Image (cartoon, rainbow, N blue to C red):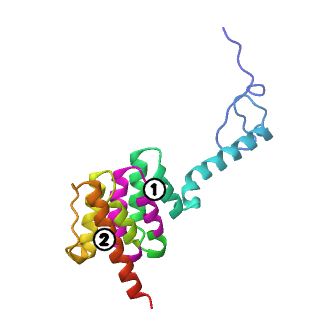
Amino acid sequence: MKPPENPKTKKTTKIDGDPKSTKAGGKPGSKPPAMKPIYWVMLIGCILMAVAYFTWDFLSGPPSVEGLAAQAVSGSDAKERLQAVTSLGLIKEKKVAIPALRRVVQDAKDPDVVVIALHNLIGFYDYDSLPVVFKALAHSDKKVREAANGGLVQYFGGKLPNNILYHVVDSPEHHAESISKLEEYYKQKKTDIVP
């Protein structure tokens, strides 16, 4: 048989908010152990990392126009290049977008990227960008030549100026002849415009 318990020596656990209560056999009125300084440092570090992770995109802002052009020209994969050139096409400020789009048309190796850049560049109806589009008429990829020709026809209102003939499937020699005529036309009109 068990001996009766003495109420004065019995350890109790009270969870009623009484400051003199005991928890898990502790002494009445004792405080929980303080957190060690290293734990505080670790906790603050984790909080700072979480805040930096969730706010980095907001703080860093959108990529620069030059950065988008560089991604469109030499991005690591096709998806990245296409996203970059598409983002360039969304820029509506001419003096910012046009130089970047010209660079992409001239420097990009991916024909799909060049086609998108040509469509966006022609959409600005920028006369000074025409020589870049003329050079695209001699591109090795048929899609690029089609985009350049279609853009020029659109720019000049339905046909190339001075009855210049250009066919996407013609020989490179014929392309060079057509491009030469377009460049002559451009130079002539450029001198007519500038006093």
Q: Earlier in the sequence, mark 2 or mark 1?
A: 1
Residue span colored magenta: 99-128
- Magenta highlight: main SS: helix
Image coordinates for residue 46, horizontal then vertical, percent: 66, 44
Residue at label 1?
107
Check the picture and name the quadrant holding the C terminus: bottom left
Residue marked by disc 2 = 181
Residue 37 painted magenta: no
Looking at the image, can residue 31 be seen?
Answer: no
- In three-dimensional space, the C-alpha distance between marks 2 and 1, rounded to whole angstroms, equals 24 Å
Residue in the image at 74% along x and 39% along y = 39
19 lies above or below 82: above
The quarter of the displayed image where residue 77 is located: top left
Above or below 8: residue 96 = below
User: x and y percent of residue 13 in the render?
Assistant: 67, 32
Residue at 43% over, 54% down: 108
Does 119 lie within the magenta span? yes
Say the numbered circle drawn on residue 90. none
Dot 2: element: helix
Foreground of the two, 33 or 118: 118
* 72 sits to left or right of 159: right
Q: Residue furthest top?
A: 1
Quadrant of the image containing the N terminus: top right
Q: Residues within 10 Å of mark 1 (few under 14, many from 20)?
A: some
Whether 79 is drawn above or below 103: the answer is above
Rendered image quadrant of residue 40: top right
Label 2 or label 1, whichever lies nearer to me, is: 2
Q: Amino acid at mark 2?
A: Lys
